[in-house]
Image: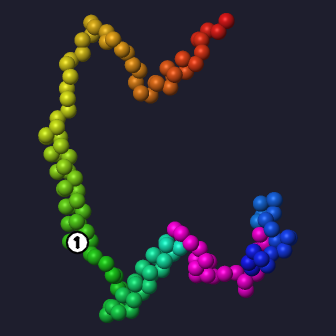
Amino acid sequence: MTEDDRTPDDSGRTDGSGLPVAPDGETPTWRERKERSDGLSRLTYEYFERSRREDQDLRQESDYVERDVLGFPTWPHEIIRNLSIASFFVGIILFLSATMPPHIGNPANPSSTPAIILPDWYLYWSFGLLKLGPLNPD
């Protein structure tokens, strides 16, 4: 059913029920619905359809019977890859912590008050509320 074939009665309803449901014989298949769409949904459909097709082709070409697993084994491939990536990032963190130690300022002096006293970041909104109007309106 195209937009030209619709009668005024087929338009969207105001009660939220939308268009009437098509009979089973006229309901488009998944492939037909995806062939009509554009953009990201079309790209996603094509990607998964291609990967499914490639997986099916690999399974048909394989010599194994039912227990065919196509992929890399966890040991040694995945474990070694994950360990090397984790070691790289741990090394970067250790290098940065060794070459750039945190700056430690002078010890606090309890007898002197700083010129500007600022609240912690999570209290800024409450100090902004104080600026909106007088505290005790009369």
Looking at the image, which residue is at 54% across and 69% down? 39
Tell me: 117 left or right of 136.
left
Residue at left offset 55%, top offset 21%: 129
Dot 1: few (<14), some (14–19), or many (≥20) neighbours within 10 Å?
few
Q: Where is residue 113? Give x, y as percent.
A: 31, 9
* Quarter residue 13 falls in: bottom right
Residue 107 at x, y = what percent?
21, 17
Q: Is residue 107 left or right of residue 54?
A: left
Screen quadrant of the C terminus = top right
- Quadrant of image for the N terminus: bottom right
| Image spot of residue 7 (x, y percent) | 84, 74
Q: Check residue 68 for magenta coloring.
A: no
The residue under the point 58% across, 19% down is: 132
In the rendered image, which quarter is residue 87 located in? bottom left
Asked whether, in this view, residue 42 is left or right of residue 10, the answer is left
Q: Is residue 21 magenta?
A: yes
Q: Tell me which segment is drawn in magenta.
A: 19-41
Q: Read off the residue under disc 1.
A: 77
